[in-house]
Amino acid sequence: MAAPSVEELSKRREEIRGRLASVGDLRPGSLVGRYRRCGKPGCHCAKEGDQGHGPSWSLTHAVKGKTVTRIIPAESVEQTKAQLAEFDRFRSLTKEFVDTSEALCHARLEGAVSEEEAEKKGSKRASRPKSPPKSRR
């Protein structure tokens, strides 16, 4: 399979740029629902098999090397899940954008080298050094 052309890669990069422009609200992290037991002997959570009180939702992510946790109200869980999904989409798009841009730069470089070689039409023989090598003491 032939490598994509410069034109194909440029078109793909512009398409990705357009998808990046459509990125909405996003946030990094992990959303976790936790259940707990209150410790009161007469409460339903004290019974065997009961999952406990909850869920209590928390969002965690790293900020400057420290884990930050925020409590998410139950009514905001779906919105938070959508924001987390949008963050994943953003990361995927940026990786695809970088990979495509790198391939485009490489294709342009290969094209420039091929044109330069065609213009030179010189020998492939390496030139001899102009000065003697330095001694290793």
Image (spheres, rainbow, N blue to C red):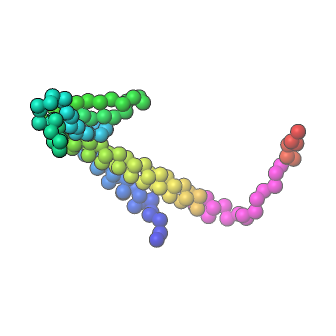
Q: Is residue 129 magenta?
A: yes
Question: Could you tell me which residue is drawn at 29 percent across and 30 percent down?
Answer: 69
Query: How many marks on residues?
Result: 0
Q: Could you tell whether 51 is left or right of 68 in the image?
A: left
Quarter-of-image position of residue 35: top left
Question: Could you tell me which residue is drawn at 22 percent across and 43 percent down?
Answer: 81
Task: State which region is magenta.
Answer: 115-130
Q: Could you tell whether 90 is left or right of 122 in the image?
A: left
Tell me if residue 12 comes above or below residue 76 in the rendering. Answer: below
Indicate the position of residue 112 as horizontal and vertical percent values: 56, 57
In the image, 72 versus 84, the foreground residue is 72
Tell me if residue 39 comes above or below residue 129 in the rendering. Answer: above
Quarter-of-image position of residue 79: top left
Tell me if residue 39 comes above or below residue 1 in the rendering. Answer: above
Q: Could you tell whether 52 is left or right of 66 in the image?
A: left
Indicate the position of residue 135 as horizontal and vertical percent values: 88, 42
Indicate the position of residue 38 as horizontal and vertical percent values: 18, 29
Quarter-of-image position of residue 9: bottom left
In the image, 54 versus 103, the foreground residue is 54
Quarter that holds the C terminus: top right
Question: Could you tell me which residue is drawn at 66 percent across and 61 percent down?
Answer: 120
Residue 79 seen anywhere in this rendered image of the structure: no
Q: Is residue 63 magenta?
A: no
Indicate the position of residue 130 as horizontal and vertical percent values: 83, 49
User: Dominant secondary structure of the magenta stretch?
Assistant: loop
Residue 2 seen anywhere in this rendered image of the structure: yes
In the image, 9 versus 51, the foreground residue is 51
Question: Could you tell me which residue is drawn at 23 percent across and 37 percent down?
Answer: 34
